[in-house]
Image (cartoon, rainbow, N blue to C red):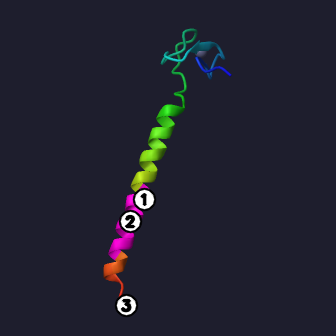
């Protein structure tokens, strides 16, 4: 619905999406999804490589 605005958590005033702080009360506004997606993707990449390295270690380490 409100793609170009985000609501202040404290005073519920609609602010421009580019604003970092509320124009009404000056509190920090919640950051929208792009940042969350990036952190999630990087987390899954790290987890993936952790599992891959773990599997490689297990392949060579475990007795057959
Ligand atoms: Zn506010």
Q: Is residue 22 above or below residue 46?
A: above
Mark 1 and mark 2: Cα distance apart in space: 6 Å
Ligand 1: image quarter: top right
Which residue, given by chain and number where applicable, does mark 1 sit on?
A: 48
User: Quarter of the image containing the N terminus?
Assistant: top right
**Is 57 placed above or below 39 here?**
below
Residue 40, position in %: x, y? Answer: 48, 45
> Badge 3 is on which residue?
64
Q: Is residue 51 left or right of residue 60?
A: right
User: Which residue is at a point 54% across and 18% down the rendered structure image?
Assistant: 17
Provide the residue span drawn in magenta. 47-57
Along the viewing direction, whichever of 33 and 20 lies nearer the viewer: 33
Mark 3 to mark 2: distance in Å? 19 Å
Element on which disc 1 rests? helix
Q: Residues within 10 Å of mark 1 (few under 14, many from 20)?
A: few
Q: Residue at x 42, y 46 (%)?
A: 42
Q: Is residue 5 magenta?
A: no
Can you give x and y, in whole percent of width and height, for residue 29 in the image? 54, 22
Residue that mark 2 sits on: 52
Among the two numbered marks 3 and 2 on one chain, the one whose residue lies closer to the N terminus? 2
**Which quadrant of the structure image shows residue 14?**
top right
Residue in the image at 54% along x and 32% along y: 33
Callout 2: SS: helix
Residue 10, disc: none
Mark 3 Cα-neighbour bin, 10 Å: few <14, some 14–19, many ≥20:
few
Whole-percent x, y for residue 53 in the image: 35, 66
Q: Are marks 1 and 2 in contact (CB under 8 Å)?
A: yes
Secondary element at tag 3:
loop
Q: Is mark 2 within 8 Å of ligand 1?
A: no
Q: Answer few, some or many: residues within 10 Å of disc 2's Cα (few below 14, many 20 plus, some between 14 and 19).
A: few
């Amino acid at each position: 619905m409100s793609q170009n605005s985000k609501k202040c958590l404290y005073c519920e005033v609609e602010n421009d999406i580019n604003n970092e702080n509320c124009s009404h009360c000056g509190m920090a506004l919640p950051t929208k999804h792009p940042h969350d997606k990036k952190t999630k993707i990087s987390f899954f990449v790290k987890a993936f490589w952790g599992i891959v390295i773990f599997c490689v270690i297990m392949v060579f380490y475990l007795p057959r």
